[in-house]
Image (tube, grey):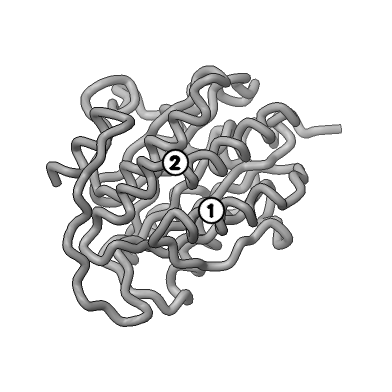
Amino acid sequence: MLAALALILCTSCELPAAPITAVDAGSVDVELVLAVDVSSSMDEGEFALQRAGYVKALRHPDFITAVQSGVRGRIAVTYFEWAGSVLQDSIIPWQIIDSPESADDFADKLAQRPIVGSGGTSISNAVAFGADLLEQNGFRAEKKVIDISGDGPNNTGAPVEVARNNAVANGIVINGLPILIHPTETLEGIDRYYADCVTGGPGSFVLPVHVASEFVTAIRRKLVLEISGLTPGPGPAALKPVNLVKCMVGENYRLVYPKP
C-alpha cells in the first residue's frame, strides 16, 4: 500500500516491486476494461487527445511500476470505443501486461487503430458490454474494473443506472473520466452525472478533465489509481455532489429536442 501511495505522490519514484507469488496462466491482479467515448459530441481534436492520452499512459513508467508492484505483478487489459453502440472494429482483445514490452505492445495496437466517431451516447451499452467481457475472459482477479470516459449523458439504450447496478452487483467497480473541455448542451455538470449515475462499487471514483492539457496526466493517474487500488485524495476529483442529478436527463433531452 505504501508503494502504491508513493506512486500517487510523485511521478518519478523508483519503487521495489512486490514479491511475485506463484500464479497460473489465468491469475492476475486486476482485470481492466478501458471503455472510451467516441460519440459525435466530441470533435476530432478531442478524439486525438483522448487516444494519445491512453497510449502515453500505457507506456509510462508509473503505470508499469504500478503493475509490477502488485502481488502477481501483472494485469489483464482490453479496450473498446463506444457511442450509441460499441464499435466492434475498435476492440483490442484481452492481453496480459506485466512488463514495459507487453505494455508497449498493447499501446502500439491502440495507436495503430483508426479513430472513427459515431452517433448517440449509450453509456449503458458500454457498461453492459464491458461487464460481459469481464465475465467471459477466463482470467481470475480479486478486482474487476470498467474504466469509462465520456463527455455526455446516456441518451439511448437501457437506463444507465440499470447497467451500473447490474455490473456492481456482479462485483465490478466502475470508475469515470468525465470530459468537460466542451460541455454538451444536454448537461454541463457531466462530472456530477458520472458520480451519481455511472460510477459504482467499492472505492469507485470520478476524475474529471477540464482542459485539454490535463488529458495525458489524468488518464495516467487514473490507470495508476485503478491498478494500485487507491482512490483520489480529498479534492474536487474525489468529491461526490451534494445535489443529485437526474440520471434520465439525456433521454429526456433527446425526447424534447430530437435531432432533425
Q: Which of 246 and 210 is in front in this view?
A: 210
Could you tell me which residue is drawn at 17 percent across and 63 percent down?
19
Crowding near the residue tagged with mark 1, few <14, some 14–19, many ≥20 C-alpha atoms within 10 Å: some
The answer to whether residue 118 of the structure is visible from this angle is no
Q: Kindly identify which numbered label has been placed on residue 60.
A: 2
Kind of residue at badge 1: Asp
Q: In this view, does 99 lie above or below 249?
A: below
What SS does tag 2 mark? loop
Kind of residue at badge 2: His
Kindly report the distance in space between the C-alpha atoms of the residues bearing marks 1 and 2.
9 Å
Q: Kindly identify which numbered label has been placed on residue 23.
A: none
What SS does tag 1 mark? helix
Q: Nearer the viewer, residue 156 or 78?
A: 78
> How many marks on residues?
2
The answer to whether residue 157 of the structure is visible from this angle is yes
Could you tell me which residue is drawn at 57 percent across and 21 percent down?
212
Q: Is residue 105 above or below residue 213?
A: below
Q: Is residue 198 above or below residue 245?
A: below
Residue ranking furthest to the bottom: 24
Could you tell me which residue is drawn at 17 percent across and 44 percent down?
3
Picture quarter containing residue 256? top right
Q: Nearer the viewer, residue 74 or 243?
A: 74
Mark before the other along the chain sequence, 1 or 2 = 2
Residue 104, horizontal then vertical, whole percent: 53, 53
Q: Is residue 144 above or below residue 115?
A: below
Could you tell me which residue is drawn at 24 percent across and 57 percent down?
70
Residue 99, horizontal then vertical, whole percent: 40, 58
